[in-house]
Amino acid sequence: MLNASRAAVLAALLFALPLIAPAHERDAGQADERLVDKFTRFAGSKANAEALVNGLRNDQEVKLTSSTQASATFTPKTDKMGLGNVNIALTLAKATLAEQGITRPTPQQIEAALNGGTVTNRDGKQVMLKGILAQRASGLGWGKIAQANGFKLGELLRHKHAEFRHHRHHAEFKHHRHHHAEFAKVRFERHDRMERAERPGRHERMERAERPERPERGRRG
């Protein structure tokens, strides 16, 4: 009877196993959602962000839509990419467009930033973008791609691109203010030492303050 009970429990567990996703698959799913949330504003919608993440991750067709602009459909120029590489690729694409003054890109502009193409910058000039994925497909590493587009990959990944310039400007201003304060402090200390050196010392003041000697009293005879 006990063996039959154990067999029933084991059968139930075996039946439930296919319904439980492996840990690495659950983690991957959560990471996908985080990337989707991170790039939703850049992509224009959550659906577009999902299309970008899934397209780059699985090397499949990406279709981006917009309520005000024409849609864009393209296939990434790279093979399947891990989540970390997807994050880097989209971060570089976002930064590349931001450099041209484009912070709310159209589907066509996102395609150009990733696969290469022409965009109109904030000054109304046509700019040819090499494409982050096209550069990656040519064999360049992420660091070289970032450098070719005028970025430092480590700094770019630590900060949102729009905030990075502000952070750098703030850091330079803070350094300048600190340097000015240190210079003023040195001048004050130097001036203070000079004044103290010019003041008479304690021994000199005591000598000046000595009373004149008293005349000797006459001796009694």
Image (tube, helix red, strand yellow):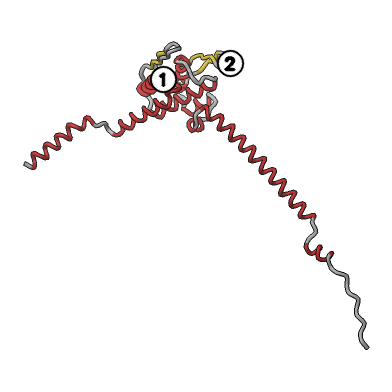
Q: 91 and 130: which one is in front?
A: 91
Quadrant where the C terminus is found in the figure: bottom right
Nearer-the-camera pick, 199 or 83: 199
Q: Which amino acid does label 2 sit on?
A: Asp
Q: Which residue is drawn at 14% across and 34% down?
A: 11
Labelled pair 2, 1 in contact (Cβ < 8 Å): no
Residue 79 seen anywhere in this rendered image of the structure: no
- Local SS, label 1: loop
Residue at image location 55% in from the left, 25% down from the top: 150
* Total marks placed: 2
Q: Which of 162 and 27 is in front in this view?
A: 162
Residue closest to the far top: 70
In the displayed structure, 176 sits above or below 196; it is above
Q: Do we see residue 17 in this rendering?
A: yes
Q: Where does the image place residue 157, in percent across and percent down from the top left?
A: 48, 31
Q: In this picture, is 3 found above or below 149?
A: below
State left or right for residue 183 relative to residue 30.
Answer: right
Q: Distance between the residues labelled 2 and 1?
A: 26 Å
x%, y% of residue 41?
Answer: 44, 23
Percent position of residue 166, x then y: 56, 30
Relative placement, left or right, of 66 versus 211 is: left
| Number of residues whose C-alpha sits closer than 10 Å to that of mark 1, classed few (under 14), some (14–19) or many (20 or more) | some
Q: Which residue reaches farthest left?
A: 1
Res 181 → quadrant: top right
Residue type indicated by callout 1: Ser
| Quadrant holding the N terminus | top left
Crowd tier of the residue under label 2, counting other residues whose Cα lies within 10 Å: few below 14, some 14–19, many 20 or above: few
Residue at numbered disc 1: 45
Quadrant in the rendering for residue 13: top left
- Numbered label attached to residue 123: 2
User: Picture coordinates of residue 38 (x, y %)?
Assistant: 42, 27
Disc on the earlier residue, 2 or 1: 1
